[in-house]
Image: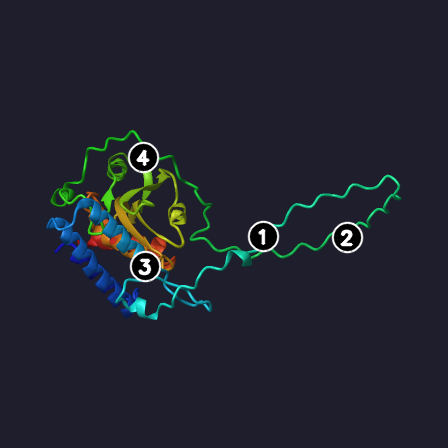
């Protein structure tokens, strides 16, 4: 089955040390559950509206963060029977309303009495020494946030689809019930044929049912600006038009590199959602030359992308 690629990807991540055995078992069980829901829809046992509700309920049940390095307990919600469910403590009840601090009422300056003696002026306090600034959380790169981006066009033709998409075009959604917005394909084809943009990032929308365009890079934007757009605590897809200089021939070859960014600090729900939709999205993007998967900033280094492109070129 084509959907088994999701499990193979998870198994590869386990072998490479990107997942621990507990997370892999959890993904495997969740995969089987998702397959059951999708099979029920395909067999006609589940109506379309019931499938959407079951899918959303299932994905919502996966919405918990991995616990690591925190001294405070992290309350999680998991699928019954999963390895996470047994260890998850019960969710504490919300604090009573009376215990919550009420906002302080604004204080008014009292009106001085006419007969009262004028108050002596208050002594001017010496200016306090400036407190040291809190250390800023380092970003993925030194580029300014949002630098190098351009507005996303809405007037590009959306009829063209990748040649490789014909085999899955009848499957309107991925195994997670997520579709691909036509604008994603249109902008990708524009990058491939016009070189009007340097890169594009895609995300799953807030409703969790469609891959949409997230950010678009200007033709002269840098690699640092591209990786700086990627969120520190979430997942993204991206396509980067990488210019590879062949040292032997002194010629530059451009390759479109597909980037799958799954931050170590992203929730398991998002990691699963993006992993199970990655191949479905790629099937619409005809002309990709290499792929880079990264979970931390070291794996996003430009040298890593260059190596992926080098491997793709020398393989041919």
| Foreground residue among 148 and 5 | 5
Residue 247 picture location, percent across and down: 29, 51
Residue 18 picture location, percent across and down: 30, 64
**Does the rendering let one see residue 130?**
yes
Distance between mark 4 and mark 1 Cα atoms: 55 Å
**Does the rendering let one see residue 248?**
no
Return the residue at label 1. Answer: 102
Q: Extreme top residue here?
A: 155
Q: Quadrant of the N terminus?
A: bottom left
Disc with the residue nearer the chain's start (4 vs 3): 4
Q: Is residue 280 above or below residue 269?
A: above
Distance between mark 1 and mark 3 Cα atoms: 36 Å
Identify the disc placed on residue 93: none
Return the residue at label 4. Answer: 196
Q: Are marks 4 and 1 in contact (CB under 8 Å)?
A: no
Disc with the residue nearer the chain's start (4 vs 1): 1
Disc with the residue nearer the chain's start (2 vs 1): 1
Residue 293 picture location, percent across and down: 29, 55
Left or right placement of residue 72 versus residue 4 in this view: right
Left or right placement of residue 1 versus residue 85 in this view: left
Return the residue at label 3. Answer: 268
């Amino acid at each position: 089955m084509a959907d088994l690629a999701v499990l193979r990807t998870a198994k590869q991540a386990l072998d490479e040390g990107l997942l621990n055995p507990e997370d892999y078992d959890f993904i495997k069980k969740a995969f089987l559950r998702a397959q059951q829901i999708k099979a029920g829809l395909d067999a006609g046992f589940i109506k379309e509206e019931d499938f959407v509700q079951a899918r959303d309920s299932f994905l919502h049940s996966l919405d918990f963060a991995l616990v690591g390095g925190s001294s405070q307990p992290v309350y999680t919600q998991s699928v019954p029977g999963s390895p996470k469910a047994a260890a998850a403590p019960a969710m504490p009840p919300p604090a009573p309303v009376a215990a919550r601090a009420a906002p302080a009422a604004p204080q008014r300056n009292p009106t001085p009495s006419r007969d009262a003696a004028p108050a002596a002026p208050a002594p001017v306090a010496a200016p306090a020494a400036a407190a040291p600034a809190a250390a800023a959380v380092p970003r993925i790169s030194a580029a300014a946030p949002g630098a190098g981006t351009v507005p996303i066009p809405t007037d590009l033709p959306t009829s063209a689809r990748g040649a490789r998409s014909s085999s899955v075009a009848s499957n309107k959604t991925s195994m997670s019930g997520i579709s691909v917005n036509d604008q994603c394909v249109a902008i990708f084809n524009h990058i491939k044929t016009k070189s009007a943009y340097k890169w594009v990032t895609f995300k799953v929308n807030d409703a969790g049912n469609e891959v949409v365009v997230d950010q678009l890079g200007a033709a002269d934007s840098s690699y640092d600006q591209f990786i700086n757009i990627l969120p520190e605590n979430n997942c993204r897809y991206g396509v980067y038009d990488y210019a590879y200089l062949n040292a032997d021939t002194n010629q530059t070859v451009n390759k479109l590199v597909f980037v799958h960014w799954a931050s170590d600090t992203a929730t398991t729900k998002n990691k699963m959602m993006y992993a199970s939709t990655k191949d479905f999205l790629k099937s619409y993007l005809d002309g990709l030359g290499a792929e880079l998967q990264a979970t931390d900033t070291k794996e996003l280094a430009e040298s890593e992308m260059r190596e992926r492109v080098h491997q793709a070129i020398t393989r041919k």
